[in-house]
Image (cartoon, grey):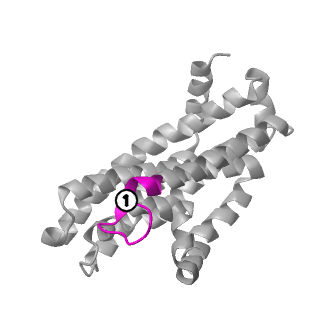
Amino acid sequence: MPFAPVLHAEWIKIRTLPSLLGGLAGILLATTGFSALAAAGADGSDPLYSAFFGVSLGQIAAIAFGATAVSAEFRGGALRLTLSAVPDRRRWFAAKATAIALPALAVGLLTGLVTLLVGKAVLGADGPTWGEGLRGAVGCGLQLTLMALFAAGLAAVLRSGAATLSVLIPFVLIVSFVVGDLSGSVADYFPDRAGQVALHSTWDGALGPWSGLAVTALWTATALLAGAWRIDRGDA
C-alpha cells in the first residue's frame, strides 16, 4: 500500500480518539496556563523564559499524546489488524510518526504564539522583544513536537503507554532537575532540557538555541529508530 493512504488511515485514528484530542488540547492549556502564572510572578531576570516557563509542563502533555497514539496499537490486537492491511511495518511506523508529528507541530506552534501573546500581555514592558519572542514560539513548537515523537518511539520499544509514561514523566519532573543540580552541564544534554535553551534570553551552557533543539532531535531520532526496529522484529 502506498504511503499516502497509510498516513490518511493513521490520521483518522488520531482525530477520532478523544484521548488523543485531549492530549493535544492539554499541550495548549498546560503550556499557556503555567506560563501565564510564571509570568505573573517573574523577577525580570529572563523575560523570555518567564513567558515560556509552561513548556516544561506542557511537554508532559506532549509525551502523553505521543505515547498514547502508539500504545493504542498494542491493545486488543489492533496492531495485528493494522499490519494485515499494511504488511510493510516500517512504512506503517513512518506513517504513524508522521501522523503524530503533524498535529503536534501545528498545536505546538499555535501554543508558542498564544503563549508569547499572553506573556507579553502579562509582563508588559518587561516582556521579551518580538524577535526573541518569535524565536521562543518556534522553539516551543519544535520542542513539544520532538518530545511527542520521542515518547512515541519509546512507546514502540516498550510496547506500553503506561510503561512509557512511568519512565518519562518522573524523568522530566524529577530526575532531570536532580541530576541537573548535581552534575551541572550533563543535564543540559537531556532531551527535555536541551531544546528549552531556545526559550531563554541568555544561556551560559555549551548549547545554543538551535544546537539545543538539534540535541533533542538526535534523542528523538534514536528513539524512533529503536521503535522502528522493535516494530519490525517484534510480534504483532
The residue identified by callout 1 is 198
Indicate the position of residue 139 as horizontal and vertical percent values: 38, 53
Indicate the position of residue 159 as horizontal and vertical percent values: 77, 49
Which segment is the magenta one?
198-213
Q: Amino acid at mark 1?
A: Ala
Of the 4 image quadrants, the one containing the C terminus is: top right
**Front residue (pair 210, 234):** 210
Q: Secondary structure at mark 1?
A: helix
**Front residue (pair 85, 156):** 156
Indicate whether 80 appears above or below 43. Answer: above
Which residue is found at the position 69% from the left and 58% from the top? 164
Identity of the residue furthest to the left in this view: 125
Indicate the position of residue 168 as horizontal and vertical percent values: 63, 63
**The magenta stretch spans residue 25:** no
**The magenta stretch spans residue 204:** yes
**Front residue (pair 73, 235):** 235
Q: Is residue 158 left or right of residue 19?
A: right
